[in-house]
Amino acid sequence: MRHAKRQQMAQQAAQRQVKKKQRSWALISGLAAFFFAGALAFGGYQVLVHPETPLPRAWNPTVPLRISDPVTPLTGWKLNRAAADQAQCLAALDGFASLQPLAPLEESDQCFIRDRVDLRGVGDARVVPIETRCAIALRLAMWETHSVQPAAAEFLQTSVSAIDHIGSYNCRTIRTGNGSSTRMSTHATADAIDIAGFQLADGRRVRLLTDWEPPGRKGDFLRAVRDGACDWFSLTLSPDYNRLHAGHFHLQSRGWGLCR
């Protein structure tokens, strides 16, 4: 009996030793995996930030937005980051827009333009001078480069020389089909711009009020640039939305993603 008990105790002791070694090896393996993953992450970061990285800048999350870069799944994220910071916004627009930074406008607690700019052109298109937010100017520049000019070439075989607007900043409430509401419009903070049409390089004009209907090449162009605006603005409203927008696109830099 005593011999069997001693044998059982020896086996239990051996099992405890095995488990102790297993825990030690598990701890060592875990630490090794942690440091290996850290080394990989550090190495990956170094690849991203290295001046001679093989990763194209449009695919590199550490490189700021450049308007002329090809569109990738990172472009929208980069755009939102730049639009949220005035310094990044102005840097992104350098060389891609004609504008002048202005001091903030504070008309009231509800009506103001914080990152105010005097905008006169984006890309290859003129803009009648307008005071708006840098974020709107940046989104317009992305729209002009990646949506408006390609659509003009495809549907109208020319380019756009000017973008016609009917305003950005306006200290007012939202207009609805039932009249004014009590909520302030995004125009009250220059977070929106209304686009009425386009001037083409060959002298023609395209107006939403007259060219949205009936169907035709100009209407196809307008629908293409409306759809393109949905990629660059947080909210896009067109004549398809309601009669209040029969003559313009309402383009917003903040909103809930409505595209109509």
Image (cartoon, grey):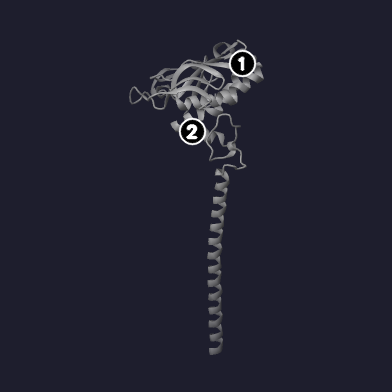
Residue 1 visible in image: no
Residues packed near mark 2 inside 10 Å, few (<14), some (14 to 19) or many (20 plus): many
The numbered disc on residue 179 is none
Q: Which residue is mark 1?
A: 219
Location of residue 90 in the rendering, given as x and y in whole percent from the top left corner: 47, 29
Is 22 above or below relative to 151? below
Outermost residue toward the front in this view: 51
Real-space CA distance between mark 1 and mark 2, rounded to the nearest whole angstrom: 32 Å
Location of residue 202 in the rendering, given as x and y in whole percent from the top left corner: 62, 12
Outermost residue toward the left in this view: 108
Q: Residue at x 48, y 25 (%)?
A: 136
Task: Report helix, strand or loop for mark 1.
Answer: helix
Task: Using the image as rendered, state which of residue 120 and residue 28 is in the foreground.
Answer: 120
Quadrant the C terminus occupies:
top right
Residues packed near mark 1 inside 10 Å, few (<14), some (14 to 19) or many (20 plus): some
Is 28 above or below relative to 151? below
Task: Report helix, strand or loop for mark 2.
Answer: helix
Q: Is residue 18 left or right of residue 253?
A: right
> Which label's residue is closer to the chain start, 1 or 2?
2
Location of residue 97 in the rendering, given as x and y in whole percent from the top left corner: 51, 23
Outermost residue toward the bottom in this view: 2
Nearest to the eye among marks 1 and 2: give it: 2
Quadrant the N terminus occupies:
bottom right
Q: How many marks can you see? A: 2
Task: Using the image as rendered, state which of residue 90 and residue 113 is in the foreground.
Answer: 90
The amino acid pointed to by label 2 is: Ala
Residue 163 visible in image: yes
Q: Which residue is mark 2?
A: 82
